[in-house]
Amino acid sequence: MGNYVGKPVKRREDARFLKGAGTYTDDIKLRKMTQSAFVRSPYAHAKILNIDTSEAKKAEGVVAVFTAQDGCGEFGVPCGWQVDFKNGETMREPKHPLLAKDKIRHVGEAVAIVIAESLELARDAAELVSVDYEELPAVTDPKKAMDKDAPLVHDDWKDNAAFDWCIGNDRAEVEAALEKAHHVTEMEFRNQRLAPNAMEPRSYIADYDVNGDKWTLYTSTQNPHLIRLLMCAFALGIPEQKVRVVSKDVGGGFGSKVYHYTEECLVTWASKEIGRPVKWTSDRSEAFLTDAQGRDHVVKSKMGFDKDGKIVAHLTDEYCAMGAYLSTFAPAIPTYLHGTLFQGVYTTPLIHLNVTAPFTHTVPVDAYRGAGRPEATYLLERIVSKGAREMGIDPTEIRFKNFIPPFDGVEQEGYQTQVALQYDSGNYEGVLKKGLEMLGYEDFRKEQSEARKNGKLIGVGFSTYIEGCGIAPSAVVGALGARAGLYEVGQVRVQPTGKVSVFTGSHSHGQGHETVFAQFVADKLGIPMDDIEIEHGDTDQVAFGMGTYGSRSLSVGGSAIMKSIDKILEKGAKIAAHKLEAAEEDLDYAEGKWTVKGTDKSVSFGDVSLTAYVPHDYPEGLEPGLDFSSFYDPANFTYPFGTHIAVVEVDADTGRVMLNRFIAVDDVGNIMNPMIVDGQIHGGVAQGVGQALLEEVVYDEGGQMITGSYMDYAMPRADDLPMIETANTVTPCPHNPLGVKGAGEAGTIGSTPAVVNAVVDALAHLGVTDIQMPLKPQTVWKAMQN
Amino acid sequence: MKISIRINGKKHTDEVEPRISLTHYLRETLDMTGTHIGCDTSACGACTVTLNGDAVKSCTLLAVQADGAEVTTIEGMAKNGEMHPIQQAFKEKHGLQCGFCTPGMVMVAADILKHTPNPSEEDIRHGLKGNFCRCTGYHNIIKSIQHAAELINK
Ligand code: FES
Ligand code: FES
């Protein structure tokens, strides 16, 4: 397309971060700012009998102590998605209070906020708040939560279900096909609960300006406009136009910073009460107890094959935890971001998924990198490999047999799945072929059989995934229960000097928008990147926005900017035609200037910009100025896909898994900046490998989280991973102007089953058919002994 | 208590509460917010600085323990507006995404390269063991440190 797109342009945001000059929320200090600390429940389920704040209020430096009795946020924080029961009953939607009033529903739920002159004083005083609880039995496992005698998380309903849901073909039809199938593979497992763990803990500063009756909320969010909307319209009932939400530098999100949290609401409320700014920054222990977590599905699945290994039917039942309350997008995760991917990359003719989503006495579950799609991919890619092994078919062969044939979405139509979606374009065999070349598959199998003779356990695992990104067409998601539109906003303001300010509703917290967005804007306008500034993360600057999640920034946010550039060029052409005394149709635009076709008469972008703002000699009837804003609502989701291949060695004595190679061939559509796409894949793969080998949030029977710090929750460290071998194929997205599909989640979605498949492959000759994640040495060792 | 610490070549003398950490002193008293806090169990390394030339996790030190020491933070790495070779290498090799772990990574890289001027991939992985990055999968951090070694040894 031009000078920048497709090149590994170095990031413009790096210098400030490398110099320690980033401005994360906790780095901000305001005049007269107070600090706050929360009093949190040590119990998972309890009645609150009494809260005594009198000592705390008297403590040194304390400005205020608030409990639910003080009337903060009558309405609680809202849920943004509604999934009703199959029988038509409305989704059960409990109030999610800012501070617990009568009852505690998970460990870490806040009971009081203490505001003081310093953090130390706030924490000291929080210790002085005394709360009497009556502890009650808890349930933390989503399947057990549906037992008849399970303790109720919310007393208003007769059981713990928030909703149930199904998708796909008629269940009876799928069951009948499984009856008749030549071979049926079964699996039962838990897709374990994970903690997202962005390295920057959540942080908020609310600043109420008494004179202007206005609020500014500095917040570590992926989603500033949505936070403002949810907080103003639902949680606090304050006028939206009086609230500015700022989220400039945010230290990673991975989903956990999409949601509207009680703490950001509470500091906003409290700031007005005390007439001073209030800051709260989570510490890591609080993050484990209060950041929305991911996964937590209990899965039972059957897949039927014909005698050639073609998949004939797939039936799955799942229990998917919601946690104690419904987080912002929670109901969408195990349903519309999960069941709709059950087609995978295969031609399976009959599919049925049934989901029961119970409340549990745990921190809420919501989207964590991949959100529903890693769970779908894990199931599909494990069960296809398991089926292949049971039938004596090579795991790559069974995939080639079942792949949906290539289609570009232009000449060939999109692929209609059995589970609602229509894939845009794909070439699934292409990525597997490329992966196999990189691996050297035949040689590996030789090496493996040699190694086995020497007692060395090595294995290879495959995953050929697809995901739905570019979230999402508003009308479609609206029909599916979303309470928001999922378009994006992009404003392009050309300054009189021809320099350009771009305002995007998309949000960058590591993805590199300031660089990538400037790349395509520069190319499309034919001007240097240095002339372009990308602004995001401030509701006073950016008209509106839906934020960043679901790998949507480029495909949706980028497209909105492209739409505005089209408008700029259209208007610019009118001005240029006037200046050149030519007809608009006779002009070409390239390299930053309009030229009269076939002549050397031209006028530059800068000249036209200046004229737009100094309209002395100007087309009649045309408004001055060169500034356009656009909303882009995508026509469809985008569907990146790929092949991930893991090569592992299992230590025969200890069960320790060493990941020796990891190959990722991803097709994310057109690539704007290959360096950044690779980086996204690396990080995503690390998180997916983390789930396979290390990570798990564990609650005990009483509802205590026993993995509440980095001493107990194992995240990948540098020596847990190999260098990651990446490659791409390019199948452009046919329905957005940049042809991009999204790369943010691919790594996490594709990688997990590849690793587990590889370990099973290494141990298959010992009779191992399945191992529960995470594949800790003791788990693997035990599996080897059975 | 009164402490006196030389930080990035400049002497700072302050009255501090004995219980505050060095991280807290840097961030809250001196407004040097480049040093980050990512955990409360000395596990993440976001707070790494060098103390008398060696990398330390500043959250595990009390400010008073650093009395009389020579401390370098991320803010002290660039000289006369020019980025340190390690910083340049991180930019060149895309060794950062959200940037939150980055100050700690740069400081620990300095320590790795001080002790092993030509580190192997394994040396680097080993040296990074105390620092979490959730964004990069460490891949490009390792490339960055290898590249920094080249730049420094040139
Ligand atoms: S903040 Fe010091 S190690 Fe995590
Ligand atoms: S760059 Fe985000 S944690 Fe390392």
Image (spheres, rainbow, N blue to C red):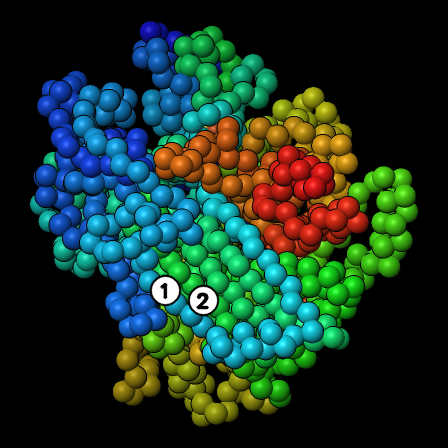
Say which quadrant the C terminus of chain A sits in: top right
Q: Is mark 2 within 8 Å of ligand 2?
A: no
Q: Are marks 1 and 2 in contact (CB under 8 Å)?
A: yes
Depth check: give the residue in front, A126 or B120. A126
Q: Is residue A351 visible?
A: yes
Q: Earlier in the sequence, mark 1 or mark 2?
A: 1
Q: Is residue A31 left or right of residue A740?
A: left
Depth check: give the residue in front, B11 or B114. B114
Q: Where A129 sits versus A472, above or below?
A: above
Say which quadrant the N terminus of chain A sits in: bottom right
Q: Secondary structure at mark 1?
A: strand
User: Which image quadrant is residue B79 in?
Assistant: top right
Q: Residue at x 65, y 51 (%)?
A: A770
Q: Where A698 sits versus A547, above or below?
A: above
Q: Secondary structure at mark 2?
A: strand
Identify which amino acid the numbered label 1 is placed on: Asp
Q: Is residue A205 visible?
A: no
Residue A310, how many percent across, how many down? 69, 75
Instruction: Give the chain of mark 2.
Output: A
Q: Residue at x 16, y 40 (%)?
A: A102
Residue A598, how many percent across, how many down? 59, 90
What residue does disc 1 label? A164
Q: Residue at x 33, y 52 (%)?
A: A148
What residue does disc 2 label? A354
Q: Residue at x 73, y 27 (%)?
A: B117
